[in-house]
Image (cartoon, helix red, strand yellow):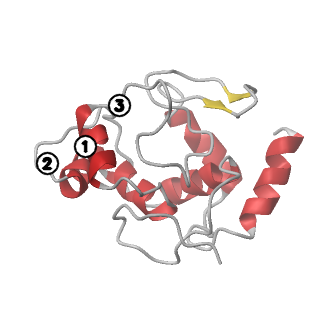
Amino acid sequence: MNSKLIVTLAAISFAAPAFAEGDPVAGEREYNKCRACHMIQDDDGNTIIQGGRTGPNMWNIIGSPLSAEEGFRYSPGAQELAEAHPDAVWDVHSLAAYLTDPNGYLQEHSGNASARSAMTFRMPDGAGKDNLIAYLLTISPDAPEQPEESDGAPLPPPEEE
């Protein structure tokens, strides 16, 4: 693990109550399931984890607006989700719900009962998903404070005090 990631991991650990039980080190290993489609490249162009480009870059995913990576071609269902919730950002709960059933999530929250995701991978609830989300928090240095609880519906970021 590089030193930049260790510093980020330490900083995020204080701001991540919802998935604090997850193990980010185990989550980094869990991320191997995601590498076929997703890479992690920071804002300076440094590759954290080399991976595919079928899915969007996962750097700073938590706290990012829905379907907003510049230049990435999102599925129509993902675009409809972003249009239905223009102020929403991914948080630990919405990302966990999406990972459980990407198509179901889009259908429930986009307003289109036949919306489809390009992501076919599904991740059941459990330690693996908690660990993955804990890891994704470590590579989301701009993530706002995470809600303690949520049903996973898309939410705008918390208001800054």
What residue do we see at 56% from left, 38% from top? 58
On the rendered image, what quadrant is the N terminus found in?
top right
* Coordinates of residue 133 in the picture (x, y in percent): 55, 55
On the rendered image, what quadrant is the C terminus found in?
bottom right
Q: CA distance from mark 3 to mark 2?
A: 16 Å
Point out which mark residue 112 bears. 2
Q: CA distance from mark 1 to mark 3?
A: 10 Å
- Is residue 20 in view? yes
* Coordinates of residue 138 in the picture (x, y in percent): 69, 52
Amino acid type at circle 2 is Asn
Q: Are marks 1 and 2 in contact (CB under 8 Å)?
A: yes
Label 1 belongs to which residue? Answer: 80
Relative to 12, 126 lies left or right: left
Point out which mark residue 7 bears. none
* Coordinates of residue 53 in the picture (x, y in percent): 50, 21
Q: Are marks 1 and 3 in contact (CB under 8 Å)?
A: no
What residue do we see at 53% from left, 49% from top? 64
Q: Quadrant of residue 96?
A: bottom left
Amino acid type at circle 3 is Tyr
Amino acid type at circle 1 is Glu
For mark 3, give the secondary structure: loop
Q: Residues within 10 Å of mark 3 (few under 14, many from 20)?
A: some
Q: Are marks 3 and 2 in contact (CB under 8 Å)?
A: no
Relative to 90, 9 lies left or right: right
Label 3 belongs to which residue? Answer: 74
Compared with 57, 138 (above or below) is: below
Q: CA distance from mark 1 to mark 2?
A: 8 Å
